Image (tube, rainbow, N blue to C red):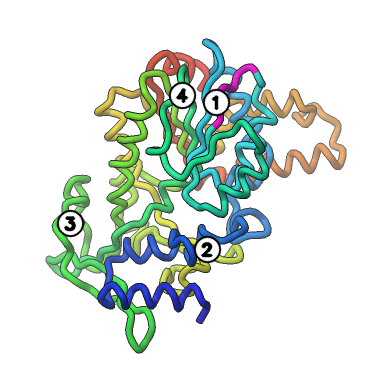
Amino acid sequence: MTPAATAIEAEVLRRGGRIPFAEYMELALYDPEHGYYSAPEPRYGRAGDFLTAPTASDWYPSVLGRLIGRLAIDGPMAVVDLAAGDGSLLEALLDHAPTKAVGDVIGIERSESMRRLAAQRLGDGISLVAGLDQLSRPEGPILIHASELYDAFPVDRVVRRGDEIMELWVEAGEAGLTWAEVPARDEVSTYFVGHGVELVDGQVAEANRGAEPFHRRLLEWAGDNAIVVVLDYGYEARRLYNPRGRAQGSLVCYRDHQLNRDPLETPGQQDITAHVNWNDLGRPAADAGWSVLGPWSLAEFLIRAGLGDLAETRGVGMEAEPTAEVMAARQEIKRLLDPEGMGSDLKVLVQATGPLTDAATRIL
């Protein structure tokens, strides 16, 4: 057993020996000393456990930087990256966005070790904070970017047994970490009722009860001239909880680019993720009067945002001579557009309010 697993199991015992899965997931991912995201080096990318669009290729930040340049029609935009990691996306974004289009640059990252790496990477002039509550809203228009943030929120897990919804808790004992079924708390059952979801017998599902209140606060903080770009895995509730597609839920784990479905295995040493319910982000936007674009597949978003024009500008478009460099660039683009991979699996939700709404609608 790894030191992280030993420490997390000991913490479960300290809390009474049995805790809700959301508490366990919080420990496994975010414990300041033993959590997966508290490691001293990034665990994403080709050398890590999984790839994301921003780390798979330079093309994603290039397109996003170009989009910022086209959106900044009334002066520089503040740019905020949620779950900024080691700052690699912000670094690439600043390389590609027109200098005159970018105002304040802010990275929000709860991992202290990642903030240190981001500070080394980005240097002075970039604000790096642990949470949104540590920030005052910058003046002027603002773009907020969140890549695979919401799918890493701790979730409650349930299973339907006959007429009853049972919660899956995590128990520590002589056999190590195991599952325990307890009657679902009212607040967990209410989540599914609120989305019009009725689980079938034996169906497992996740409830991300933190996503909607966080997103509501985010939109309030963003003010009246803002655009939010959310890149994540997810579906609307009616599809996410369809037992024909996800009878065992959407929760998966990643380590060394290998997928498994056992979050109790090597806690603190593997990523744990569950698909986003887009309705959790849509309701706050509707209540606040924001306009909503998408969610689109990553491939459709990149095309709408001008990937084709950018490829032509860089000399790797359809008319370019197929040199080794051109073919390598096209291969990177293909990875992002792959209909059998992240080009289809990843989705992009865009929400806008105020003057940026017209610009976003016109461009996208």
Of badges 4 and 2, nearer the viewer stands 4
Residue 297 visible in this rendered orientation of the protein: no
Three-letter code, disc 2 = Tyr
Residue numbers of the magenta segment: 100-105
Q: Which mark is residue 189?
A: 3
Report how far apart the C-alphas of labels 1 and 3 lie in the structure.
42 Å
Q: Is residue 25 above or below residue 327?
A: below
Q: Quadrant of residue 121?
A: top right
Q: Are marks 3 and 4 in contact (CB under 8 Å)?
A: no
Residue drawn 28% across and 33% down? 284
Q: Position of residue 198 (x, y in %)?
A: 19, 54
The front one of 228 and 303 is 228
Q: Earlier in the sequence, mark 4 or mark 2?
A: 4
- Which of labels 3 and 4 is toward the front? 4
Q: Look at the numbered disc 3 and give the secondary structure of its residue.
A: helix
Mark 4: secondary structure: loop
Helix, strand or loop at label 1? It is strand
Q: Is 285 on the left or on the right of 140, as rendered? A: left
